[in-house]
Image (cartoon, helix red, strand yellow):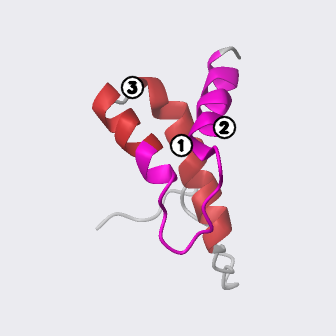
Amino acid sequence: MTAPDENDPSEPPDDGAEQARPSDEQVLAHLGGAVLLCWNELSFQCQNRILAQASDVIGLTPLPGARNEIVKLLLRHAKT
């Protein structure tokens, strides 16, 4: 086992204080951002599956036109 790297941003600082657990919304925002950044590296099949699943997420109220809004977001991101 190696010692924590002080310069690794993925490692929280060990200042003795307990870090608050991020909310599900914060974690999902990071996951969504990561998917957005990697989108062009995903296979067409994987992209299509994610878009289809976005319209049917258990526990979330369906968003009319979610797929179209996601595609628009992806296109806006691709232009930057």
- Please name the amino acid that badge 1 sits on: Ala
Q: Is residue 69 above or below residue 78?
A: below
Are the residues at dot 1 and dot 2 in contact (C-beta closer than 8 Å)?
no
Q: Position of residue 66 (x, y in %)?
A: 61, 46
Q: Which residues are magenta?
A: 52-78
Q: CA distance from mark 3 to mark 2?
A: 20 Å
Are the residues at dot 1 and dot 3 in contact (C-beta closer than 8 Å)?
no
Q: Which mark is residue 41?
A: 3
Q: Is residue 67 visible?
A: yes
Q: Is residue 8 visible?
A: no
- Please name the amino acid that badge 2 sits on: Glu
Quadrant in which the N terminus appears: bottom left
Q: Position of residue 40 (x, y in %)?
A: 45, 23
Q: CA distance from mark 1 to mark 2?
A: 17 Å
Instruction: List the residue tagged with mark 2.
Output: 69
**Which quarter of the picture shows residue 60?**
bottom right
Instruction: List the residue tagged with mark 1.
Output: 34
Q: Element at badge 3?
A: helix
Give the residue at x 33% y 26%. 44
- Please name the amino acid that badge 3 sits on: Glu
53 relative to 32 in the view: left or right: left
Q: CA distance from mark 1 to mark 3?
A: 12 Å
Residue extending furthest front? 64
Q: Earlier in the sequence, mark 1 or mark 2?
A: 1
1 vs 2, front mark: 2
Quadrant in which the C terminus appears: top right
Number of other residues with Cα within 10 Å of mark 2, as a class: few under 14, some 14 to 19, many 20 or more:
few
Q: Is residue 40 above or below residue 36?
A: above
Decide whether residue 59 is among the magenta residues.
yes
